[in-house]
């Protein structure tokens, strides 16, 4: 997928190509690879009502407004192409769901630090970026554990804040 400028916005012809792939149901090996990218699978542009947009929602949103911002349009076109190919999207849906999990412990971890890296938004993003089978991660100020069954992210202060986190 080509991009224009240094801003990472997808080129219009990439969006149009994805729309054609979605409409025709053409097989394209690049679609699952791009959708599984951590930046894409955690994108709020794939989100409808606090979950992954359904095939019907995606199709409706693409048809509604051709002037939508390019990042949103690219994400929706990519998702529509994945749906049209019959791709299994449960992993992407799990990542999107993690963006809305309750966060336990953020107030205690960040109580005395205005520049704390463990805000609820940042922690949800970190949880989303983990691989679907991963349950633990590390930020500068905290360690997080994802509980998909309970739809919660639990935080603990990081034991050794001076060491560089692995992710």
Image (cartoon, rainbow, N blue to C red):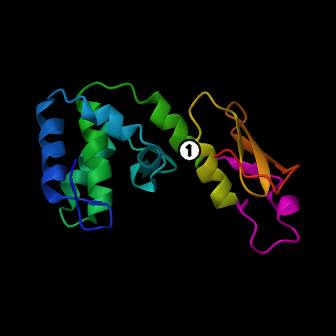
Residue receiving disc 1: 129
Instruction: List x then y, in percent, for residue 55.
Output: 31, 37
Near-viewer residue (113 or 151): 113
- 34 lies left or right of 121: left
Q: What residue is drawn where x is 21% and y is 52%?
A: 2
Say if the magenta span includes residue 103. Answer: yes
Query: Which residue extends farthest bottom?
Result: 114
Instruction: List x then y, in percent, for residue 98.
Output: 60, 43
Q: What residue is drawn where x is 18% and y is 26%?
A: 27
* 94 shown above or below 1: above
Instruction: List x then y, in percent, for residue 102.
Output: 71, 49
Magenta segment boundaries in residue numbering: 101-119
* 51 shown above or below 26: below
Say if the magenta span includes residue 160. Answer: no
Quarter of the image for residue 8 reads bottom left
Q: Can residue 88 be seen in this view?
A: yes
Instruction: List x then y, in percent, for residue 88.
Output: 38, 25
């Amino acid at each position: 997928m080509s991009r224009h400028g240094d801003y990472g916005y997808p080129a219009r012809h990439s969006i149009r190509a994805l729309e054609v792939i979605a409409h025709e149901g053409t097989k394209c090996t690049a679609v699952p690879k791009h959708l599984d990218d951590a930046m894409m699978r955690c994108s709020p542009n794939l989100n409808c009502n606090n979950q992954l947009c359904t095939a019907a929602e995606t199709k409706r949103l693409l048809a509604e407004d051709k002037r939508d911002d390019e990042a949103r349009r690219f994400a929706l076109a990519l998702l529509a192409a994945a749906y049209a190919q019959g791709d299994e999207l449960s992993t992407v849906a799990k990542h999107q769901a993690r963006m809305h999990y309750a966060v336990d412990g953020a107030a205690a971890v960040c109580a005395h630090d205005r520049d704390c890296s463990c805000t609820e938004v940042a922690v949800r993003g970190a949880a989303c970026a983990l691989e679907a089978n991963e349950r633990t991660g590390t930020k500068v100020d905290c360690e997080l554990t994802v509980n998909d069954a309970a739809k919660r992210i639990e935080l603990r202060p990081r034991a050794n804040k001076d060491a560089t986190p692995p992710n």
